[in-house]
């Protein structure tokens, strides 16, 4: 599911989400030295493209908060860290 729709509790009909297709996008300003990887729906993908990363994060503060709260879940390579012990 799209991380923005999820954090903002947006319920879309399957058709609205462009058949539910998700786009994997990287955000570069969230974590120092790491990229954040998020899945976005068609509509939020376009919004990110048009507004740019920082404006997108400002417009979606629940997303920014979610990224800061769960860095392991979203930082690239972060999931792999769990298997390193
Ligand atoms: Zn979305």
Image (cartoon, rainbow, N blue to C red):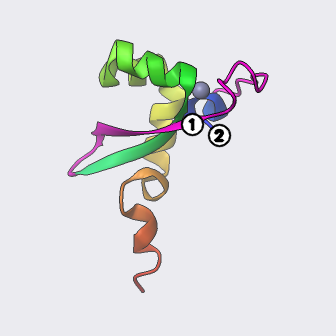
* Residue 76 versus residue 85 in the image, above or below: above
Mark 2 → mark 1, Cα distance in angstroms: 7 Å
Dot 1 corresponds to which residue?
22
Image coords of residue 80 (percent x, y) = 42, 71
Does residue 23 belong to the magenta stretch? yes
- Which residue corresponds to the image point at 36% horizontal and 63% vertical from the top-left? 77
Q: Secondary structure at mark 2?
A: loop
Question: Which stretch did the figure color magenta?
Answer: 8-33
In the picture as drawn, the residue positioned furthest to the left comes out as 33
- Which residue corresponds to the image point at 47% horizontal and 74% vertical from the top-left? 82
- Quadrant of image for the N terminus: top right
Count numbered badges in the picture. 2
* Residue 22 versus residue 49 in the image, above or below: below
User: Crowding at label 1, few (<14), some or many (≥20) Cα neighbours within 10 Å?
Assistant: some
**Residue 27 falls left or right of residue 5:** left
Image coords of residue 69 (percent x, y) = 48, 47
| Mark nearer the N terminus (2 vs 1) | 2
Q: Quick check: marks 2 and 1 in contact, CB under 8 Å?
A: yes
SS majority, magenta = loop
In the picture as drawn, the residue positioned furthest to the top comes out as 50
Dot 2 corresponds to which residue?
1
**Residue 36 falls left or right of residue 3:** left
In the picture as drawn, the residue positioned furthest to the right comes out as 13
User: Crowding at label 2, few (<14), some or many (≥20) Cα neighbours within 10 Å?
Assistant: few
């Amino acid at each position: 599911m799209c991380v923005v729709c999820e954090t903002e509790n947006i319920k879309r009909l399957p058709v609205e989400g462009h058949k539910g297709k998700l786009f994997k996008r990287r955000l570069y300003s969230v974590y120092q030295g790491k990229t954040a990887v998020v899945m976005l729906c068609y509509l939020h993908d376009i919004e990110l493209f048009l507004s740019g990363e920082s404006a997108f994060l400002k417009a979606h503060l629940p997303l920014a908060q979610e990224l800061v709260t769960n860095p392991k879940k979203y930082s690239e390579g972060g999931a792999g860290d769990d298997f390193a012990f």
